[in-house]
Amino acid sequence: MPSPLRVLTIIGARPQIIKAAAISRAIASHARGRIVETLLHTGQHYDANMSQVFFDELGIPPADINLNTGSGAHGAMTARMIEGIEQVLVRKEHDVVLLYGDTNSTLAGAVAAAKLHVPVAHVEAGLRSFNKRMPEEVNRIVCDHCSTWLFCPTDTAVANLRNEGFSTTNDAPPTADRPHVVQCGDVMYDNSLHFAAIAKERSPILRDHGLMPGGFALATVHRDNNTDDPARLNSIFRTLLLLHERHGLDIVLPVHPRTRKMMDALLAPDVKDSLDQSPRFLIVPPAGFLDMIALESNARLVITDSGGVQKEAYFFGKPGVVLRPETEWVELVREGQAVLADADPERITVGFENFLQNGIPEVASLFGDGHAAERICDELLRTW
């Protein structure tokens, strides 16, 4: 029997932990004995509510390696990650580095592996917002151009890579210079299908907060350009308060620790007072994955600046108002599942009220059939 493929999976932020769960399940079942996985956690998200709870809920074993990087400026944080990952890779115990998404952990893994000529497999390759002021955009572009396998969740992602000069018909063995581009579907859709029933049974969040299905809007705000700009942050919260009061719809806002800090520092006094005096504008701690699925699947609609939450809203048939001027998930906007509103009060209001009145059109599946993780395993084994 041939030796198993040795994969080093690098995660560091909450979304990556969730995505990794799908492929870890596939490795343990579909590719059992053929792939051996080592899990490295950079420590980018180190708060228990932002990290450990996801390991516990998703049934992921503790990380084999934890770099305990912690927070800091982008350059210092990424440098510490590169140094730690390099120390692992020079032991030559891994055949492939598996990376997810577009965080600093993704960037660090790509740079460390590429410099040591360890092949990189990038899950969620080809996403583009076409805004390089976003650090995530820089991270995903660099990672794509360091990768040997580019696992794309959608046809649009494949087209983006083709437009950048990648061959999408390479039949030769994959290399960093001639990578394989594979449209595999979205591992987050795999997870949503797998965990939806579990969340319905186990999540207490609706009961704990007195929420009725369809009786609330879910909001998330965490991107730097929204949280660190006083004008944008106040505009978003003033508009959410206005819509809450006008329509009598509960608002549930799970708050990232950093967002909480910026709210305390930057929100105007009258906005803070209004939030304090609105008993059904619920600002709650960061939600675990099962709680987020329960919130997303039961919300009337979703207002977010998160790429992952945009998709998850779609998975559960919920309209999305996107608090950004652009999105990497252009399919959602094109098919009427979401609207780009930025931090503009009028656009947020129009999008919100249009979805309240009209809902969203039915569309064919945009993100595969729920078996993306198995396809990724098969491609790695086929072409290694």
Image (tube, helix red, strand yellow):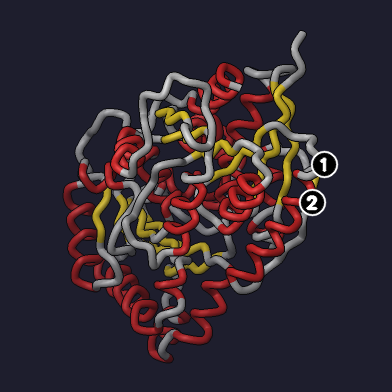
Q: Report which residue position mark 1 lands on.
A: 91
Query: Disc number at residue 10?
Result: none
Q: Report which residue position mark 2 lands on.
A: 87
Residue at the extreme top of the image, as rendered:
1
Spot occupied by residue 80 in the image (x, y as percentages of width and height): 71, 63
SS for callout 1: loop
Query: Dot 1: within a 10 Å radius of its alpha carbon, few (fewer than 14), some, or many (20 or more) residues?
Result: few
Q: Is residue 32 above or below residue 271?
A: above
Spot occupied by residue 78 in the image (x, y as percentages of width and height): 63, 63
Q: Is residue 39 above or below residue 79?
A: above
Q: What amino acid is at disc 2?
A: Gln
Give me the residue at 53% from left, 26% from top. Answer: 376
Q: What amino acid is at disc 1?
A: Arg
Which part of the image, by quadrant, shows the N terminus? top right
Residue 16 can be seen in this image: yes
Residue at the extreme front of the image, as rendered:
177
SS for callout 2: helix
Spot occupied by residue 27 in the image (x, y as percentages of width and height): 66, 25
Residue 200 can be seen in this image: no
Give the quadrant of residue 322: bottom left
Tell me, yes or no, whether the two marked residues, 2 and 1, touch with CB atoms within 8 Å: yes
Q: Nearer the viewer, residue 208 or 51?
A: 51
Spot occupied by residue 109 in the image (x, y as percentages of width and height): 63, 49
Give me the residue at 73% from left, 41% from top. Answer: 39
Query: Dot 2: within a 10 Å radius of its alpha carbon, few (fewer than 14), some, or many (20 or more) residues?
Result: few
Q: How many marks?
A: 2
- Position of 22 compared to 337: left or right? right
Give me the residue at 24% from left, 73% from top. Answer: 345
